Amino acid sequence: MSFENLGLSDEVLRAVKAIGFENPTPIQEKTIPEILKGNKDLIGLAQTGTGKTASFGLPMIELTDFAVKKVQGLVICPTRELCIQISNDFNNFTRFIKGAEIVSVYGGAGIVKQMSSLKKGAHIVVATPGRLHDLIRRKAVDLSNVKYVVLDEADEMMSMGFKEDLDIILNQTPKEKRTWLFSATMPAEVSRIADNYMDSPVEIIAGKKNSLAQNIEHLCYCVREKNRYEALKRVIDFYPDIYGLIFCRTRNETGEVAEKLIRDGYNAEALHGDLSQMQRDAVMKSFRSKTLDFLVATDVAARGIDIDDVTHVINYNLPDDVEAYTHRSGRTARAGKSGISIAIITPAEKRKLAAVENRTKVSFRQEKVPSGSLVCEKQLFALVDRFKNVDVDKDAIANFIEPAYEKLKKLTKNEIIERFISMEFNRFLDYYKNAEDINISDAPQKRKASSKQAYTGNMKYKGGKTSRLFIGAGKLDNLNKGAIIRLVCDNAGIKSNHIKKIDVLREFSFFEVESGYADVVISSMKNVNFDGKKVSVSMSKSRRN
C-alpha cells in the first residue's frame, strides 16, 4: 500500500514525498484511515522508531481547519526532545499548507516567548505536561476548542509521574473531543488513562502487545560486580564501529561511567538531570553529529531521543522496571534497521533478567566477555578493512608521493605493514596483553535461604515500613507530586511504586519511601537541581511505619 491510498490530501502527500517517505509503516497503514474515516477514540500500540508521529500527525493535520486560528489539535508527550522532534515533523507535514501554525511548549526554555507564540495564534500545540500545566495556570493557553488530543508515549508519561498534570490538562479540554493514545507498552497505569479519558477506543496493534522489535538481537554478559566496567570496555572494544547508548540506573553512576570512559580515551558524554538545558543541547548535538561515540544516560534523561543510526544499546545495569527495557532497547533498530541490545549482569541479577525475558517475550543469548586476544583480533581486522577501503585522491596527494617513497624506500613491504599496524594498534596490544578472563562460570549459583520468590520486576508493596523524608521545596517553587516522583526516580534510580504518600506544602514537602530505599534516596539527592534551585532530601523528624 502507498500513502496515496490512505485518504490524504494533495498538500499532505506533497509533503510526505518531499520528506522522503515511500510506503507507510504498519502502524501508519492501520491508523491513518481509521482516524480519517472514523469518529472514535483510538489506542495505537507500536514500538519506538516505527513511525508513530506520522500515524497521528498526518490525519490530525487533515482534520484541522487552518482557516480558524484556534487551538484544535493538542499533542502531549513526556520530554522536551520528543516535543521538539514532533513539532519539527508537524512543520514538515504542513510545509505546503498556507498559514499553518504549530507551536511547541516545553520546560527548559523561556516561557514568555512561548506565551507570545500562543498569543499570536496556533492551530496545533505540541507540549510537555509540566509546561502546559504551567501555561494553563497562567491562563496563557485556551484549550476550549480542542477537537483532537494525542497522548504520545503515554507509558513514559505515567512512569515519569505526570498523572497529576495530565488530569488537570485533560479536564481543560472539551468532553466531546477525540483522544488518540500511543504507547510502546500497555501497563496498568496507561489502561487506567484509557478508562478515565477515552470512550470505547479502537485498539490498533502493530506487532505484539508489550513486545519488542523483531530486528533487535539481545545479548547478555555475566560478570562479578567489580568487573562490570571492565566488561563494558571489552564489549565496546569488540565492536569497532559501535555508536551506542549506555544506560545507567542513577545520575551519579551515569557521571562516573562517562568520566571513566573519557579518561580511558573514548568519545563519551553523560546525559542526566543535573545538566542545564544548554549543556544538554550541546551533548545531544555532538551525539547526533557522531562527534560522540557513546551517550551515557539515565532512563529519564534519554526519553525522547530519536536517532536512527544507534547500533547498540548497552544496559550497564538492568532497569528496576522491566517495562523500561522496552524503551531502552527501542533506541536501536529504528526505521527498519537492525541493532543489538546488551545487558551486563551479575549472578544475583539473573532472576531480574528472567523477569525481563518473561515480560517482553525476548530471549537473551548469553555470551562470553571477549578475551583480550579476541578484542585485538577484531580491532586489527577493522583497521585493515578501513585501510583497504580508504578513498585515495591521487591528485591531492601527488606532490607528497615522491618524498614519501624516498623516506620509505629502505623498508620492505612486511616492515611497512608491521609499522603501520603497530602505530595504529599499540594501544590495544598494550592494554590487553595481560587481560584476564572475567567471565563467571555457568555453574548454578547457590540461592540464599530467604529468596523463596522469583523476582518479577514489578513486585507489589506489602504494607511494610516506610520512611518519611523532607525536601526543601514546595508549591511556591512549582513543585508537585509528579515532579517529586521524577526527581527521586532519576537521581536515586528507584521505581515510582517504591514512593508512597506525598505531601506538597507551601515552602517544603514530605514524601514516604519504603524504608530500605531511604538511605540511597538521601545520599543520591544532595543539592539536586529543580528549576534552578538546589534542594536536598533529609530524614523527617517524625517517622511513620
Image (spheres, grey):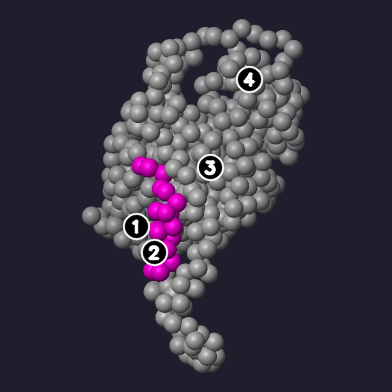
Asked if the residue under mark 3 is in contact with the one under mark 1, i.e. CB atoms within 8 Å, the reply is: no
What amino acid is labelled 1 in the image?
Ser
Tell us which disc is closer to us: 1 or 3.
3
Structural crowding at the residue carrying mark 4, measured as other residues with C-alpha within 10 Å and reported as few (<14), some (14–19) or many (≥20): many
Q: Is residue 58 above or below residue 442?
A: below
Q: CA distance from mark 1 to mark 4?
A: 57 Å
Looking at the image, is mark 4 or mark 3 earlier in the sequence? 3
SS for callout 4: helix
**Which residue has dot 2 on it?**
381
Q: CA distance from mark 3 to mark 2?
A: 25 Å
Residue 9's tag is: 1
What amino acid is labelled 4 in the image?
Ala
Query: In the shown orientation, is residue 498 left or right of residue 393?
Result: right
Which percent across, then down, holds residue 263?
A: 63, 52
SS for callout 2: helix
Residue 229's tag is: 3
Asked if the residue under mark 2 is in contact with the one under mark 1, i.e. CB atoms within 8 Å, the reply is: no
Q: CA distance from mark 1 to mark 3?
A: 53 Å
Looking at the image, is mark 1 or mark 2 earlier in the sequence? 1
**Which residue has dot 4 on it?**
518
